[in-house]
C-alpha cells in the first residue's frame, strides 16, 4: 500500500504504519502517547501502570498494524481500542490478586484467554453481580473488589457479622452457578 494516495497527514501516517515504516510508529507515539498515558492513568490510578499500558499499546499497534484500515478517523480510534483492551488486561491482572479472582483462578482450567475474553469476563462478572441485587452484590463488591473484611462491612452497613458472612456465602454460590451456566454455553 502506498501512502502517497492519502491526502491527510493522519491517513498518510496510518498507511505508512501499515506498510511497516518504523518512523510512522515513532510519529504515532509522539502524537498520541500522552493521550494514551492519560487515559491509562485515569483508569488505573497509577503512573507506573499507565507507563506499562502505554508501552504495551504501541507494541501491540506495531504487531497488529496489518489490521488497520488507513484513514483520518481509523488510526486514533484503532489506537484507543487497543488502549481499552490493554487497560482491561491490566485491571484483570490487578484483580487477580483479590480473593474473588484467586478463587475463580483456582477453578479455571484454561488460563490462556484473549483480551476480548477478558473484557467479556468483566462484563459477565458485572452483570452477575447486578443480578444478585442488594445487599448481596454490595457486600460482595465491598469484600472482594474493595478488599474489606467482613467485620468492616458489618460496621459500615450496620448489619450483623453473621448476616454479612451469609450474604457472602450465598452470593458466591449464586455467582458460581451463573459462571457455570456461562461456561457451559462456551463449551
Image (cartoon, rainbow, N blue to C red):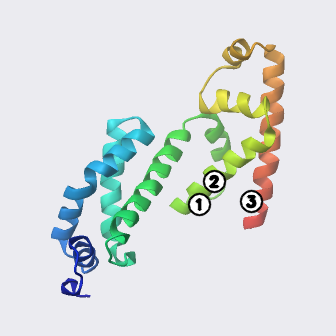
Depth-wise, is mark 3 or mark 2 nearer the camera?
A: 2
- Mark 2 residue element: helix
Dot 3 or dot 1, earlier in sequence = 1
* Quadrant of the rendered image containing residue 150: top right
Residue receiving disc 3: 183
Which image quadrant: the N terminus? bottom left
The number of numbered discs placed on residues in the rendered structure image is 3
Residue 46 position in % (x across, y down): 37, 35
Under circle 3, the secondary element is helix
Please tell me whether mark 3 or mark 1 is closer to you in this view.
Answer: 1
Relative depth, front residue between 44 and 35: 35
**Residue pointed to by mark 1:** 117
| Mark 2 lies on residue | 121
Residue at point 79%, 44% (across, down):
131
Residue at image coords 78%, 32%: 134
Callout 2 touching callout 1 (CB < 8 Å):
yes
Measured from the top left, where is residue 156 in percent x and y?
Answer: 68, 15
Amino acid at each position: 500500500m502506498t501512502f502517497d494516495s492519502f491526502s491527510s497527514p493522519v491517513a498518510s501516517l496510518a498507511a505508512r504504519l501499515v506498510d511497516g515504516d518504523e518512523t510512522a510508529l515513532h510519529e504515532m507515539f509522539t502524537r498520541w502517547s500522552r493521550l494514551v498515558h492519560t487515559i491509562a492513568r485515569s483508569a488505573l490510578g497509577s503512573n507506573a501502570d499507565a507507563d506499562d499500558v502505554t508501552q504495551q499499546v504501541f507494541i501491540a499497534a506495531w504487531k497488529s498494524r496489518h489490521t488497520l484500515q488507513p484513514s483520518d478517523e481509523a488510526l486514533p480510534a484503532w489506537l484507543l481500542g487497543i488502549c481499552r483492551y490493554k487497560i482491561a488486561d491490566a485491571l484483570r491482572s490487578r484483580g487477580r490478586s483479590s480473593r474473588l479472582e484467586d478463587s475463580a483462578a483456582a477453578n479455571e482450567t484454561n488460563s490462556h484467554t484473549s483480551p476480548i475474553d477478558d473484557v467479556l469476563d468483566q462484563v459477565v462478572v458485572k452483570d452477575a453481580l447486578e443480578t444478585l441485587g442488594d445487599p448481596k452484590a454490595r457486600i460482595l463488591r465491598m469484600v472482594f473488589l474493595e478488599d474489606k473484611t467482613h467485620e468492616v462491612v458489618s460496621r459500615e452497613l450496620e448489619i450483623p457479622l453473621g448476616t454479612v458472612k451469609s450474604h457472602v456465602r450465598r452470593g458466591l454460590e449464586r455467582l458460581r452457578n451463573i459462571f457455570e451456566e456461562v461456561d457451559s454455553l462456551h463449551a
